Image (cartoon, grey):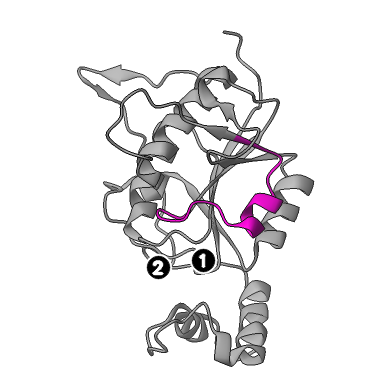
Amino acid sequence: MANREGIESFVLVHNIAKRHNIGTMARSATAFGVSEFILVGRRDFNAFGSHGSTSHVKFRHFHSLTEARTYLKEEKDCDICGVEIADGASPVNQHPFRKNTAFLLGNEGTGLSAKECEICDFFVYIPQYGCGTASLNVTVAASIVLHHFGVWAGFSERTRDGNKFVVAERPAKQVRRNFCAEEVESVIEERRIKKENASHDFLDENGTSDSPSNMMDTLFGDS
């Protein structure tokens, strides 16, 4: 298959119930050539299962799905693909891709919400051939879909050394491990939203002193 020069893939994460699944998805993202891993809502994540791969993929954070969609559409020229057994969804093995694509995966129990479906341009599902389960784990589904996209895009296979693939040197560490850092302006906006929606604080669910927002207060001080 021809190499589609310059094609990129992205993973969009919102409303994943089990935070440790993000670490495992990040490992798959690095294996299958994902350019960015986009978190919506909370910025902290559990890197369990990543085996150090979170250092090799860029993380980006947005407060809302609308902001994430705007970024992907206007700056990355992306289609947004929902991974869901939805009406009109195409089997992923048919490779119904056209250009840069961001894959939005649903909650482990409930799948994609109506709000999440609204930002999707199209949907794919993974055909199953056995009768023992109704669906796949979100990390397994991500791996299958990202692999198919890589095949369609003609990504170059990574060099092998014996029975393993060669891992690149680890880049410089982020400011805080298992945390998606942001620009100062974004931190200020987060503070503003948190003050206005104190009773509905989604970034600091437990109100603990070691929350992401308090971490940012320490890093940047009062503005």
Does residue 30 belong to the magenta stretch? no
Sooner in the amino-acid sequence: mark 1 or mark 2: 2
At 59% from the left and 40% from the top, the residue drawn is 86
In the rendered image, which residue does mark 2 sit on? 176
Left or right of 135? Residue 4 is right
Residue toward you, 169 or 32:
32
Please, what secondary structure does the residue beneath circle 2 have? loop
| Residue depicted at 65% across the width and 72% down the height | 186
Counting from the top left corner in percent of width and height, residue 40 is at 57, 62
Residue 27 visible in the snapshot:
no
For residue 196, say whether it is visible.
yes
When the figure is inspected, residue 174 is found, relative to residue 168, above or below; the finding is below
> Mark 1 highlights which residue?
181
Residue at (37% x, 61% y) in the render: 19
Highlighted magenta segment, given as a residue range: 107-123
Name the disc covering residue 31, or none. Answer: none
The answer to whether residue 161 is above or below residue 71 is: above
Q: Kindly state the secondary structure of the residue where label 1 is placed.
A: loop
Badges 1 and 2: C-beta atoms under 8 Å apart? yes
| Extreme residue toward the left, this view | 162
Left or right: residue 52 compared with residue 99: left
* Left or right position of 57 against 68: left
Residue 194, by quadrant, is bottom right
